[in-house]
Amino acid sequence: MWANCSVFDYDTRHADHPPRLMTPSRPDLAAGATVAGATGIARAFRRAMVSQCHPTMLFAVLMPFLIALLGAFLLLWLFWAPLTEWLRTEAAQWEVVNQVDAWLVGIGLFSLKVYLIPVIAAAVLLPVSGILGLTIAAVFVMPLVLRHVSQREYASVTRQGHNATAVSVWNALWVSVVFAAGWLLTLPFWLIPPMAVLLSIFWWAFAFSRMLRVDAIAEHASPDERRILLERHNTRFWILGFICALINLLPPAWIILPVYSSLVYAHYGLDALARLRGERVIEVDAKVRVE
């Protein structure tokens, strides 16, 4: 009796066993179950670019950029002299640096320490202002970003998050601390030429991914939905962060990147949440049909 039914798979030879629910065979549901890899990522960046051109989002660029700029000036003013002095004292004890410096001076080129100390000092202080700008974007600009994109493109995605502000602040704090500690602890590896770029990309990918993926869905997703999305899309959130970290290597991008990256994660997160809720609607509908 059930042999040709698309919902049940029932063996009539064992009538005492209940029917087993099967997933309806529909290609569009399978495609909608998860964001399709590169397509979903490309769509998020494309939509973010369109959203970034809106006057509201162009104005939103000012807050994190000005705060990061002010933070950079304050850090350089307050800590540049003591930091460079401390680095010179420490560098005097680095045997390898002393040998290379003596060799370069001996052949009539330049003193390595003259250039190395300012570079290390800048590598310590400037990322602190950068993570400050990203934190401001995550905590204060992301709500504006979510309100902007949700009203225009994700009106059907209702807000079901709890304690979104507290979640956002706590997430921003621990990510900032780990970023700063990891950046400082891995600075010695910058003396190995490829590691300077690789470590910079890794830590900024970490910051973008771990900070913005939570803020992008905290207001709209329930705790259970947030857990599912973070587990299901963990790799793609990292890919988004990796791409943003590559863009971050270009200094002119520092102006818009805090807001643009927030838009990227907002579009990706809300789209993934809409698809997740679509799956649940389908599951409920299938159960109703069974009953």
Image (tube, grey):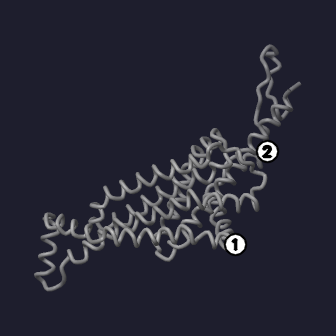
Residue type, numbered disc 1? His
Instruction: Pick out the residue farthest to the right.
Output: 1
Query: Could you tell me residue 142's position as x and y percent?
Result: 61, 59
Q: Residues within 10 Å of mark 2 (few under 14, many from 20)?
A: few
Left or right of residue 271: residue 238: left
Left or right of residue 253: residue 128: left
Left or right of residue 124: residue 14: right
Distance between the alpha carbons at the discs numbered 2 and 1: 38 Å
**Residue shown at the point (25%, 72%) measured from the top left:** 117
Q: Up-down: is 13 above or below 224?
A: above
Q: Residues within 10 Å of mark 1 (few under 14, many from 20)?
A: few
* Residue where numbered disc 2 is placed: 26
Left or right of residue 261: residue 157: right
Tell me the element at label 1. Answer: loop
**Residue shown at the point (82%, 15%) measured from the top left:** 15
The disc label shown at residue 54, or none:
1
Query: Could you tell me residue 198's position as x and y percent?
Result: 39, 63
Query: Could you tell me residue 229's position as x and y percent?
Result: 62, 45
Residue in front for this viewpoint, 222 or 279: 222
Q: Quadrant of residue 73?
A: bottom left
**Residue shown at the point (46%, 75%) measured from the top left:** 251
Task: Tell me the mark number nearer the camera, choosing from 2 and 1.
Answer: 1
Q: Quadrant of the N terminus?
A: top right
Tell me the element at label 2. Answer: loop
Q: Up-down: is 28 above or below 265?
A: above
Query: Could you tell me residue 122's position as x and y percent?
Result: 34, 70
